[in-house]
Amino acid sequence: MATLVFGMIRFLLLGFLLVSPPVAPSVASPVDSPSYRLSGYVTEAESHECLIGAVVWSGDNWTVTNDYGFYSLELEEGKHTVSCSYLGRQAEDVNIEIRADATVHFKMNSVESLKGAVVQSHSGNFLTSPYPGALKMSSGFISNIPAVFGEPDLLKSLQKVPGVQSGMEGFSGIYVRGGGNEENLMLLDGIPIYNPSHVLGIFSCFTPEAIKQFTLYKGFFPARYGGRASSVIDVRTKDGNAKEFGGSVNVGLLDARICLEGPLFKDRTSFGFSLRGMNTLVAYPVLRLLKSPYFFSFYDINAKITHRFKNSDRLVITAYHGKDNFDYSQEKQTAAASGTEEFTIGWGNTMAGARWNHTFAGSLFSNLSLSWTSYGMKELYTLQKQEVKDGADIYDIIISWDLEYSPSPSHNMDFGVSNTVHSYTTGIGCESSIYFQDDVKFGFGLDLSAGLRASVITVPGKVYPSIEPRLSINYQFFRAFSANISYTRMSQYSHLLVSGDIGLPTDLWVPVTDKIKPVFSDQVSVGLNCTLSDAWNFALEGYYKKAQNVLEYRDLKLFYQNASNWENLVESGIGESRGLEFLAEKKKGPLTGMLSYTLSKTDRVFPDGSVNEGRPFPFKYDRRHVVNLCSAYSFNERVSVNAAFFFASGCTMTVSTRPTAVIEPDGTSSVRPYSIGRNNYRLPPSHRLDVSASFRKQKRRGERVWTVGIYNLYCARNPNWVVGNSETVMIDGHQVTVKYLSQITFLPILPSVSYTFNF
Amino acid sequence: MKANVIITTFFSAFLCLLSCESRIDIGDDGLGEMLYMNAQLSTADSVHTVYLALSTQNGLHFLDKARVTCFINGVPAAVTDSVSRIKYLANSYNMGTSSQSLSVFCFKTSFKMGDDVRLRAEYGSLCCEAEVTVPQIPAVRKASLNLNRTDCRWDISVVIDDQKGVDNYYRLVCLDSATDSELLIDNTDEPLLYSRPRIYDILGLGSEKSYYDNRLNIFCDTSFKDGSCSLNVSTMQRSSYQSIDKMNVRVEGLSKEAYSYLCVCQYLDTIERMVSLTDATIPCNVKGGMGFVSVNTAFDSVFDTAGASW
């Protein structure tokens, strides 16, 4: 059966190969030498955790492992030395004689296990993807960024990357190249998550210790990704140690975490489990002491089981559940009634999925997955046993089949299909897609990635098809330099109606309808990269992005969405964003770090006239300049310090600067505040310095780490929240009302401490 | 909404423990002095009113002299430079004292459907203009006014044929023909005019309805596009309505901009606005200045109501 499937796929691909351009072979060889396929997995020696992005090569012929740690290399018949390398791991060499298709699994030792090796495992580094604008990062990057309340956070660490903004200060919003927070496809082991925030965005739902690696795509998007207009954040969790039990316990100011991993069946089946919850041991007594009627809590549960079959197949089952809960309880007495008024609102994500990895004939890698994801919000209000219930839910059921095939050393092909059934509070939709991409190495330093994604969504009354070309050209010259240019078209079939400037649980995901079209974005990126002596990396990238059918509330923004008539509250328009991003990174040595600078401009225009009367206006988070400087210094194996400096131009907001008169048809008049346009005012810039230090000590049963930090070291008064205000003053004997803004900084200097035990 | 209020209150309180507040002075908005102009003209009127003021960041100031010129299809149709009266503005949002006021100018001319009307105001070196097109007159197929003695009110029934191929916007008005003053209409049982805002449920306001949510009785043709609609409303129960000799049931044709302006006018005094995170942008179509100018068409149906009593 496998042979039949593989044969059919090879037949279909033959047609493409017959018309594909001739490529320079990477390896000089006699014309009549047969070639065979060498494939396998690259894993950590001590845990069987698969390594993503490991380089496997023989001579000039090289490849990298995919997101599942699998590689496939075509070699000619004969003797070869095949090498494998991965940052932080000792390089492995294998001498092998190729007479037929073969399998070699690399098990790589950590450099820490070697005597006298330089410690690098605690430093966060980028593993730059070959795609323009893509950045692949390890979990070490997260822990090296000092964070608010001392809680390392994936989304907060992404905000340090050029082109990514936080939106509101201190929160987990991700605004990529002028796109909205809802335009990011957040994937946890390939399954989408709709609301990745806890505590209204102060934390994300990603437990740092559970993460193996994550990749941000913001320029060129591989054809296998679709469904969002601005970025893809692909988070991969650890498979679990297949050899021995281990884990960590962390207690911080606001939350506590426990992570466990180990074998269920040694070398075959492993599990990873993490639980994180609000530190109710601290919070609950404080709130009760204050006699507060409010209580808040949140938790995350991640679980993963990985089974490795003897024939290299893998079955992975992943699950996640996270929830925020808010309670209010107060005795109430009114003229009409008395009793206990109780209010409960809970919101969160739940997802589960299974995937099967199989290799057909050693060269066609298959990933078949079935998953389900949901986001829900429920509220319950009770007074005198009268209940008012409300809720909003979104469910997705997704089936997808992804394949990777390398017909020759110079071609790597990805193709696949997927089908998603979306169920929203306001409607349903069925989304299907098919994609194909070929990564071609022409030799002489020229690489081409060309792909096409075709998708269609069916909603009641309408069908929206989309053709999304993807093209990237990369040219390497002078060994250390590379230049690239890319074009990407993305489509997004759902919108998020936002209540306010922070992510509220009542924000409503809605599908496209016969009246509300999908968002289509077209982006062109041009970049230049320079890598010096493996220690320094410099990148400069410019982009232009145009998005059609972005939504904005008409000029009457409500605090609460009426799900039944939301289409009448919004308007579709055009978003334009352009920018220049610079990144400098030092990857080696006791001092590592990065400097990022973004210069950008983002506008919106709604030609219909119902937003800002059809005139262009700046996007709310249009920040002209953003600078991030992050550094980590390891004094020795036990002590390291981190610092992060942030500077950004102010956001925009709509501010009324003078009064106007509103006169009704019958002559009734009133004085009202007037602003010349939406987002007409630019707030002062924000800046902040965060520092932290970690102290490690090896104990008998594991390693303990104390981390102390100070968020906003010099207590910069950044505008976390801004409201309009006015005062009456006397000017020339007349009372005059003067408008001003009140800037509230609710994240001033915040010391933090946390304790972690790794065992 | 209540969830959001409670959640936001809690987090605001929590964060206030850690927060500090500072002031940002807005400073000069760079607009300087400019003219404010407002006029809601109608084809049913022969004398038209224009409100003018000098706008600064401190407020709106009376103009003792200015010139207002009305152009119809590019031709000057009327000019006035004498202030008819002063209009004092009601205070809202602590925007100042009663010293804020407008100058009222009046002129005589008539408009017809399709006319391009341009209003220009000049004061010293300041000048502003607004240009609008007179919309189609509503095609009222039938209008009736009947005395409802049981409920002590007048029942109004109107059938309108929608103009095909374009979006249309309307307003229903009931007037005392003698004084031209508007009578209150109870629109809560007419689906075209009234849709109970969900905010009432969220705030636990029972099953209350209020005509005030659409007190200007504006509607558009979304639900009867290119077809026809039948409106059935009644006046409020007012004893003073018994003594009216002639009542005028008027259907006005509005431009899209005028409809948006009236939506904002109504919205500004609603409960929804009080719980909104951002304020409404008040429409402005005056170039070189601020304010709003519109021209509405009107289809009048006058009824003799003398001697009616309930």
Image: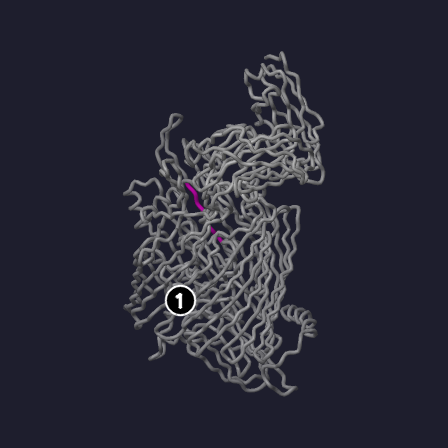
Pointer 1 indicates a residue of which chain? A
On the image, the x and y values in percent for residue B172 come to 62, 28
Q: Eyeballing the image, is A168 above or below B108?
A: below
Left or right: B190 in relation to A218: right
Membership of A285 in magenta stretch: no
Q: Which of the 4 image quadrants contains residue B174?
A: top right
Residue in the picture at 53% in, 68% down: A132
Left or right position of B28 against A232: left
Q: Quadrant of the C terminus of chain A?
A: bottom left
Bounds of the magenta span? Answer: A344-350
A683 up-or-down from A483: above or below: above
Q: Is residue A308 visible?
A: yes
Residue located 58% across and 67% down the image:
A486
Quadrant placement of the N terminus of chain A: bottom right
In which quadrant of the rendered view does residue B259 lie?
A: top right
Q: Where in the figure is residue B61, as x and y percent of width and height?
A: 46, 36
The total of numbered circles placed on residues is 1
Residue A349 covered by magenta stretch: yes
Q: What is the x, y in percent for residue A752? A: 30, 57
Question: In this orientation, does residue B197 appear?
Answer: no
Q: Is residue A521 above or below residue B258?
A: below
Instruction: Give me the residue at 66% from left, 78% from top.
Output: A22
Residue receiving disc 1 = A140
User: Label 1's element?
Assistant: helix
Identified by mark 1, the residue type is Gly
Chief secondary structure of the magenta span? strand
Image location (x, y in percent) of residue A336: 40, 26
